Image: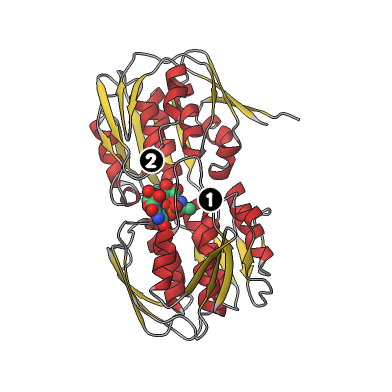
Amino acid sequence: MDSIVVTGGAELSGQIPIAGAKNACLTLMPATLLSEEPLTLTNAPRLSDIATMTALLRSLGAEVTGLQEGRVLSMSSHALDNHVADYDIVRKMRASILVLGPLLARDGHAIVSLPGGCAIGARPVDLHLTALEALGAELDLRDGYVHAKAPGGLKGGRVTFSKVSVGATENVLMAATLARGTTVIENAAREPEIADLARCLRRMGAQIDGEGTGTITVEGVERLSGATHPVVPDRIELGTYMLAPAICGGSVECLGGRIELIAAFCERLEAAGISVEETERGLRVSRGNGRARAVDVTTEPFPGFPTDLQAQMMALLCTAEGTSTLHETIFENRFMHAPELIRMGARIEVSGGTAVVHGVERLKGAPVMATDLRASVSLILAGLAAEGDTVVNRVYHLDRGYEQVEDKLGAVGARVERITER
Ligand code: UD1
């Protein structure tokens, strides 16, 4: 298994291009199932999660080409011949559940494996299922699978989420595009990836209003056509790379970054004494001499501070001046990076959903273990500022969500090397 060796101490300077959003791409890809005509995504990221979704769509009979050659993914679902999403693929990636809504909407039946637990908490799919039931789906949970039917086709309905869920909003939004009549989704998630999905579906002929607000209205149409759509920039990759110069000093321009994708995060970064500036091509982050200041952070659904940047922000706060408190409100059990950071000399106390970080002057390199995607990258960030070498083991998580992390950080002066085990 590959590991990454980070040698701390370099000041960073230069530019880092931000890729298309993994999480947007993972919901845009299943949208191909809604139409018999081709859907083409440009600015797609090259990540193992995208390869997993490709395998899932192919297993259903869709044609997917292009990812190896570049950033354009071409998909066609003109002849689906399988409506079963198998456990072997779904267990690798929770986002697989996003094929359920589109399959049901298009053909009135689907069997999708339940994703099961994962490293950052229980992560159930009840909200996905009750939302689809509100559109007339009949669901039966048997043998670890959701057996779903909509014999006369889905019908528009009112969906009121008891809790904000990105994936459940995406699933029901896709399903509603082909349902008969009007669907109103209340307490919908407002993440930029949902707005991006709505833009793509509209290009395919869907009638959608209100994305980016808590209430989305969808007027079902008979059929959807093909489209070409550029994937929105990855705000989590953006925030991650913005933290690199914040942690080890210097100045980096993140190309393609936009404030509106990440405003709450930028506000906390500035409160910590880091400068964030909009440029013509993106966002420039600089830290002069001196340490960052401690800040408190609470993760929330968009437009709040993203849970997917909590681990990376903690890496910054480990060496900030003063004591910071991080409240994780989205996922239970999402502080698995804390014990690893402690191995590097950080002073962190975790209790339930709260972590208190007492900033220390400097971290020290150590062998550490990556436990999930965002935790992995937080350890790399921490290593950038640590004295000596940090060896991050089990980095396969990283490749699910960050393309060429060592090249991107290396290009701005960081010393990051991948050791490939044969
Ligand atoms: C998506 C993102 C993930 C991000 C998360 C929150 C993708 C592929 N993944 O995950 O990176 O961390 O949003 O921003 O886009 N919940 C339920 N029942 C459900 C569904 C969710 O209780 O049926 C709970 C979850 O356990 C969690 C909360 O709702 O506590 C939010 O989860 P959700 O927004 O659904 O996350 P995902 O869509 O899985």
Identity, as a three-letter code, of the amino acid under mark 2: Glu
Picture coordinates of residue 276, whole percent (x, y): 30, 37
Q: CA distance from mark 1 to mark 2?
A: 15 Å
> Can residue 80 be spotted in the picture?
yes
Picture coordinates of residue 208, whole percent (x, y): 36, 75
Picture coordinates of residue 39, whole percent (x, y): 57, 70
- State the quadrant of the C terminus: top right
Identity, as a three-letter code, of the amino acid under mark 1: Gly
Which residue is label 1 attached to?
Answer: 116
Marks 1 and 2 in Cβ contact (< 8 Å): no
The residue shown at (32%, 59%) is: 190
Name the image colouring.
secondary structure
Kindly identify which numbered label has been placed on residue 332.
Answer: 2
Mark 1 secondary-structure assignment: loop
Give the mark, 1 or 2, whose residue is nearer the N terminus. 1
- Residue 324 appears left or right of 310: left
Report whether the residue tagged 2 is closer than 8 Å to ligand 1. yes
The residue shown at (44%, 53%) is: 124
Viewer-closest of 298 and 45: 298
